[in-house]
Image: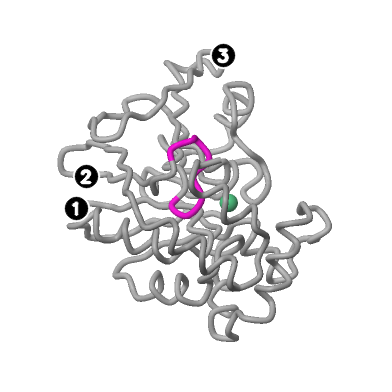
Amino acid sequence: MRTLIISDIHANLTALLAVLKDAQPFDQVWCLGDVIGYGPDPNECIERLRSLRRLVCVKGNHDAAILGEIDVQTFNYEAQASLKWLESILSLNNRRWLETLPERKTLENISLVHGSPRNPIWEYVTDVMVARANMSSFDTQICLIGHTHIPSIFLMEGDSENAVRLNSLVPGEPFKIIDKAIVNPGSVGQPRDYDPRASYLIFDDDTDQWTHHRAAYNIPEVQERILEAGLPTRHAFRLEAGW
Ligand code: ZN
């Protein structure tokens, strides 16, 4: 069975569609939250996602913010501006769907959260120190996370939380995960590793292999919709360089 793993779509429908096409064939989808926020297509992204077979999705901080579950004052000015816009456009049906998302999901041997296993909504696992501190916060072998928008894998060698190391992911090169690990597929709709292409992972449980992928998409088209919607211009510009 091939699983598509995505995160941080951030209302970028063009990027999402590019990934869904590029990733074919797949049997199920795991989504690590932040379906909305920043981008111009919140309803379209939720509806496309909801239509996917065998979808498991957890809640991100942007998803929680629009539901009033966290204080928007904790967001930067531009994120707040897009939340305001979002409030005016998000359909009731889609809002209700966001409400149903859990903060954490445990599958057979894999946990799914948006931020970190010990703080699913907020914490950023950006470095080895933070990854180390999180290794005892999940019982499965692997924990999938999003939130940083940076594809990465933190591996714990043996039983020692002190022996956690960070590996970068190379697109197109299959790998196996033997150790306990925290794995981030990167972002579909707003990559921040200076590669503007949409980022995702495929996990094939027949071969036990993981593969990181990047999918190019029409960025100018999305930038145009961001500007047309009156969303902050920075959200448009950052897409072309991937920051
Ligand atoms: Zn995000």
Q: Secondary structure at mark 1?
A: loop
Circle nearer the viewer, 2 or 3: 2
Q: Amino acid at mark 3?
A: Asn
Which label was assigned to residue 1?
A: 1
Q: Of marks 2 and 1, which one's residue comes earlier in the chain? A: 1
Labels 2 & 1 near each other (Cβ < 8 A): yes
Q: Mark 3 sits on what residue? A: 162
Residue 6 position, x and y percent, is 40, 52
Residue drawn at the location 71% of the way across and 58% of the way down: 79
Q: Amino acid at mark 2?
A: Asp
178 or 51: nearer the eye? 51
Magenta stretch: give its range.
188-195
Which label was assigned to residue 151?
A: none
Q: Mark 2 sits on what residue? A: 204
72 or 84: nearer the eye? 84
As measured in the structure, the alpha-carbon distance from the residue carrying label 1 to the one carrying label 3 is 34 Å
Q: Secondary structure at mark 2?
A: strand
Q: Which residue is farthest right?
A: 73
As measured in the structure, the alpha-carbon distance from the residue carrying label 2 to the one carrying label 1 is 6 Å
Q: Amino acid at mark 1?
A: Met
